[in-house]
């Protein structure tokens, strides 16, 4: 493979990955569980769920943290996956990564334990207002919280620890955030701004407020028993997605840079496509046109025809509208192949890792190509005749794949598609 792509841009190689999901920590544990059809969804024990319509999630309960807030936990997950990716890549000296950091982060806001503490610190006993909370915060006793709950706090901490260059760039484009971060890293290398980039997606947003908000949108599955059967992408009886936590990290390099230092090339990021439809604050356009455009742009960016794609890692949330819309988009792009092209959903097992999903699922797409094994879509018990898709039902399948697409479609019509290719021969 040449060091430049079909448009003369530097070819972007993947030289390191790190991952953590509700299935476990690290590449081997995740891949083994994912291809065995194991579910990481379980009943929530972190906070009381009595009276809630949804009582399950893909929480990561096996990583201890001193600070249980979402940004602190997201940072801890990110630290673990970055360490794994850097160890595999070998690109950096400890604390001296030779390029910038691109991050996908969820929205960060102060949480209820901190709000309660601020209220307790206020001199007002009744009729507490927002102004009263601000005055309590101004007392100077809450500076660590102020620093913790800034949107950029996670990126700044990671940049300091791992020695990335320049200011970290954090983005939040809903469920497409991970794909957006990957695209930013790819474009920076292609433009010659850097020879290496660190891309991270992390999310630890399973808390009472987030669960209630998604529940009020009727977006979550209420199939609580057993938890492992809740996520049912493309199935006729699907009833919503399952919230989950997770993180993924990718070390990207120009192919020339990776070859020059003798790095093992895990795969190639061949193309990125983005399309925003602005249809609604939470819904995407039901006609699927932005999804069609997004996949077509990713293929054009990669210089590939639809026939070259051997697998689609679907966004596949399990909500009735999203799965139908994604099927419509895939059918438009791949035509008669729609019923035979493997299209499976990792979310049936790990849940929806939200902001991190684009990076987590791109990593699983890479593993699919490298291992010649298609992860299944579990809980596919009742096919939907309106969605005649080969979702690799219930059991993994051996297949040789040279090029694959990973889809990420977010609230508000933010859509990103990534084309991943096999390592050069």
Image (cartoon, helix red, strand yellow):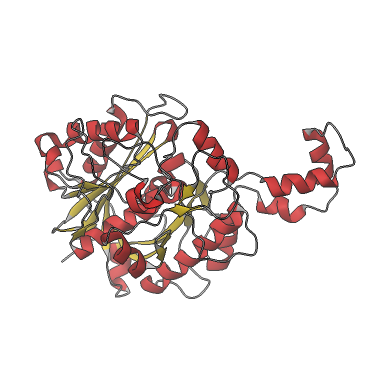
Q: Residue at the location (13% across, 47% down)?
A: 308
Residue closer to the observer: 399 or 256 = 399
Q: Where is residue 13 in the image (x, y as percent from the top left)?
A: 30, 61
Residue closer to the observer: 198 or 5 = 198
Q: In this view, does 77 lie above or below 419?
A: below
Q: Where is residue 164 in the image (x, y as percent from the top left)?
A: 51, 63
Q: Residue at the location (60% across, 47% down)?
A: 151
Q: Quarter of the image for the N terminus: give it.
A: bottom left
Q: Residue at the location (53% across, 67% down)?
A: 162
Viewed as shown, does residue 421 lie left or right of 315? left
- Residue 357 can be seen, yes or no: yes
Q: Where is residue 283 in the image (x, y as percent from the top left)?
A: 41, 28
Residue closer to the observer: 203 or 178 = 203
Q: Residue at the location (16% across, 36% down)?
A: 388
Q: Quarter of the image for the C terminus: give it.
A: bottom left
- Number of numbered tags placed on the structure image: 0
Q: Where is residue 181 in the image (x, y as percent from the top left)?
A: 42, 49
- Residue 11 can be seen, yes or no: no
């Amino acid at each position: 493979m040449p060091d430049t792509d079909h448009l003369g841009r530097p070819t972007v190689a993947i030289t390191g990955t790190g991952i953590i999901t509700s299935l476990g920590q690290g590449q081997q544990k995740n891949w083994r569980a994912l291809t065995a059809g194991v579910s990481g969804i379980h009943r929530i024990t972190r906070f009381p769920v009595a009276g809630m319509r949804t009582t399950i999630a893909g929480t990561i309960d096996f990583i201890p943290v001193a600070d249980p807030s979402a940004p602190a936990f997201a940072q801890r997950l990110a630290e673990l996956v970055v360490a794994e990716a850097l160890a595999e890549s070998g690109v950096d000296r400890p604390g001296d990564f030779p390029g910038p950091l691109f991050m996908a982060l969820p929205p960060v806001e102060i949480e209820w334990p901190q709000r309660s503490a601020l209220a307790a610190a206020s001199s007002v006993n009744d009729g507490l207002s927002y102004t009263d909370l601000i005055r309590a915060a101004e007392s100077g006793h809450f500076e660590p919280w102020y620093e913790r709950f800034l949107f950029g706090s996670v990126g700044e901490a990671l940049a300091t620890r791992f020695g990335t260059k320049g200011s970290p760039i954090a983005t939040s484009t809903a469920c497409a955030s991970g794909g957006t971060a990957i695209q930013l890293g790819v474009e920076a290398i292609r433009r010659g701004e850097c020879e290496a980039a660190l891309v991270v997606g992390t999310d630890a947003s399973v808390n009472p407020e987030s669960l209630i908000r998604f529940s009020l949108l009727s977006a979550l599955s209420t199939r609580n028993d057993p938890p492992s059967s809740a996520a049912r992408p493309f199935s006729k009886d699907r009833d919503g997605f399952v919230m989950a936590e997770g993180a993924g990290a990718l070390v990207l390099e120009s192919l020339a840079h990776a070859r020059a230092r003798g790095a093992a090339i895990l795969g190639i990021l061949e193309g990125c496509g983005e399309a925003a439809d602005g249809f609604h604050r939470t819904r995407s356009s039901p006609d699927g046109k932005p999804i069609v455009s997004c996949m077509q742009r990713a293929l054009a960016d990669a210089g590939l025809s639809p026939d070259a794609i051997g697998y689609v890692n679907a966004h596949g949330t399990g909500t009735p509208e999203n799965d139908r819309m994604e099927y419509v988009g895939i059918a438009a792009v791949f035509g008669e192949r729609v019923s035979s092209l493997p299209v499976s959903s990792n979310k049936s097992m790990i849940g929806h890792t939200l902001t991190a999903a684009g990076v987590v699922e791109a990593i699983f797409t890479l593993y699919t190509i490298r291992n010649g094994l298609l992860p299944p879509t579990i809980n596919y018990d009742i096919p939907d005749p309106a969605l005649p898709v080969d979702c690799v039902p219930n059991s993994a399948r051996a297949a040789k794949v040279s090029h694959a697409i990973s889809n990420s479609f977010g609230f508000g019509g933010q859509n990103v598609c990534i084309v991943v290719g096999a390592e050069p021969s």
